[in-house]
Amino acid sequence: MNIKERVAVLDSLGAVIGEAYDVNTVSNIIPIAHAFTPDQTPVNIIYYKISRSQRNLKKAAYTPPISRVDYSYGSIWTFHAVEKNIVKY
């Protein structure tokens, strides 16, 4: 089953660090790029755990949103602002 939904993103200690939408929840990880090259290629990609528990989703409502970026190899998420699929710094 390939369901896309709202998830909470957790750091390595289990603390909620963000909220993401339209995440393929078949796996329990999400790739987040912390930087992009001038041609919008993601670099410094770190994989974080995701959670669907109601407790973590409530905490995630008070964290910064994580935006989805589509690029030539698929989708990746970032903490940076995204406008028309272009990352803005």
Image: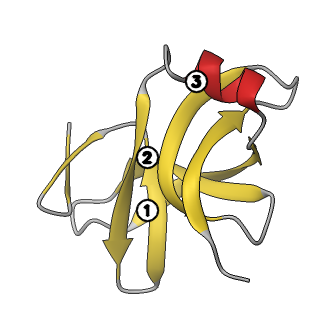
Residue 5 sits in quarter: bottom right
- Dot 2 surroundings within 10 Å: few (below 14), some, or many (20 or more)? many
Mark 2 or 3, which is nearer the eye? 3
Q: Amino acid at mark 3?
A: Ala
Task: Answer whether labels 2 and 1 touch (C-beta < 8 Å).
Answer: yes
Q: Residue at x 45, y 72 (%)?
A: 75
The residue wearing badge 1 is 42
In the image: residue 16, left or right of residue 39? right
Q: What residue is pinned by disc 3?
A: 60
Q: CA distance from mark 2 to mark 3?
A: 15 Å
Q: Amino acid at mark 2?
A: Thr
Observer-nearest of 35 and 16 = 16
Most foreground residue, 89 or 49:
49
Q: Is residue 74 left or right of residue 72?
A: right
**Farthest residue, direction right:** 13
Instruction: Determine the secondary structure under disc 1.
Output: strand
Query: Residue 74 at x, y = what percent?
Result: 46, 81
Task: Residue at 20%, 36% (x, y): give it.
Answer: 89
Q: Is residue 41 left or right of residue 8?
A: left
Q: Earlier in the sequence, mark 2 or mark 1?
A: 1
SS at mark 2?
strand
> Around disc 3, counting alpha carbons within 10 Å, would you say few (fewer than 14), some (14 to 19), or many (20 or more)?
many
Query: Image check: 16 left or right of 33?
Result: right
Q: List x then y, in percent, for residue 62.
A: 49, 13
